[in-house]
Image: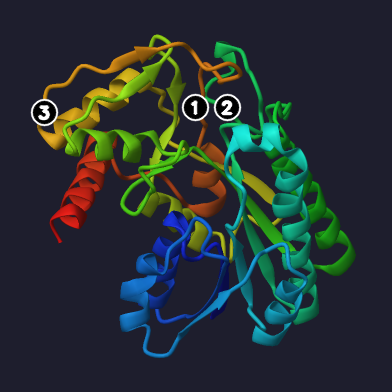
Amino acid sequence: MRALVTGGAGFIGSTLVDRLLAEGHEVDVIDDLSTGSLANLADARATGEGRLKIHTLDIRSRDVVTVVERRQPEVIFHLAAQMDVRLSVKDPVFDAEVNIVGTLNVLEGARAAHAQKVIFSSSGGTIYGTVEPVDLPLRESQPQRPLSPYAVAKKAVFDYLAAYRELYQLEFTVLAFGNVYGPRQNPHGEAGVVAIFAGLLLDGRQCTIYGDGSQTRDYVYVDDVVDSLVRSVDRGGGLLCNIGTGIETSVSEVHDAVARGVGVQAEPISASERPGELPRVSLDPGRAAMQLGWQPWTGFQDGVNQTVDWFRTKRES
């Protein structure tokens, strides 16, 4: 299979590239390296045996269409995105340029290349908006009421994909991820609390918990997420599938799990609750089990331990 991965130098994307190369596929990566890193692809570049080609390119550029058409991928994994919800609120035009216009460039390239399928990464934590506790874990039938430009863009892309499927016979699957964590995640941003806490605790510093620490998310390990992407190549056509565990884990529980992984006893710093933060999230993975044959297999503490070990090794190398 010839695959193309946008955002392929990022945390999830590079892990996917490793999996695809290990299975013998040819892989193209499009990434502007604004948040991703060539270091994430070091192993892939060393072992890819000429089956990996990297294109340093902004997803907003029309050159994306040309590159995709020229490379003729059979399947496109579209992971490149502006991922910061708060930045989307501050600058919704930039968010739309990356997450909507950038996606349209990918779709136009896919159409020109006669690609068979686009697999798109959405956000299970934002597209449904604020929900009642009785609705948890969320199913795909839950009404989508996005409350940020970032989430609006994710919702809009689903509609574009449905239109391209109808108009141009371009198949798609949309995967709505929970909070993905694992090795290679950036510990210096806002998106990955496991990585942030791991980086701080390994440095002997205290972590900050905003609010009372009871807010929950559905944490899913990166290798499990990559497995859902690979399984979507020939399954789940035209569907939205939640990729989560169905389990709520609070921020306080995350802190405790990371502290155990690091092997320290630590008290977090308390700070004021951040406005607009969703209080609770968990995703029902039932459709993914039925349609993709997928289920999460990595327990949270095991995943945290592997993440901490990766960060520790990186510091020691």
Q: Nearer the viewer, residue 15 or 134?
A: 15
- Image spot of residue 23 (x, y percent): 39, 76
Residue type at numbered disc 2: Leu
Residue type at numbered disc 1: Ser
Quick one: SS at disc 1?
Answer: loop
Q: Looking at the rendering, in which quadrant would you find the N terminus?
A: bottom right
| Disc 1/disc 2 C-alpha distance (Å) | 6 Å
Q: Taking 294 as reference, is 234 above or below it?
A: below
Q: Earlier in the sequence, mark 3 or mark 1?
A: 3
At x 35%, y 43%, the residue is: 187
Task: Give the left or right position of residue 296, taking residue 238 as reference.
Answer: left
Quick one: SS at disc 3?
Answer: loop
Q: Nearer the viewer, residue 72 or 266?
A: 266
Q: How is the image coloured?
A: rainbow
- Image spot of residue 151 (x, y percent): 68, 36
Q: Earlier in the sequence, mark 3 or mark 2?
A: 2
Q: Are marks 3 and 2 in contact (CB under 8 Å)?
A: no
* Residue position marked by numbered label 1 in the rendering: 282
- Image spot of residue 288 (x, y percent): 53, 45
Q: Earlier in the sequence, mark 1 or mark 2?
A: 2
- Image spot of residue 159 (x, y percent): 81, 47
Marker disc for residue 264: 3
Q: Are marks 1 and 2 in contact (CB under 8 Å)?
A: yes
Q: Residue furthest right?
A: 167
Marker disc for residue 138: 2
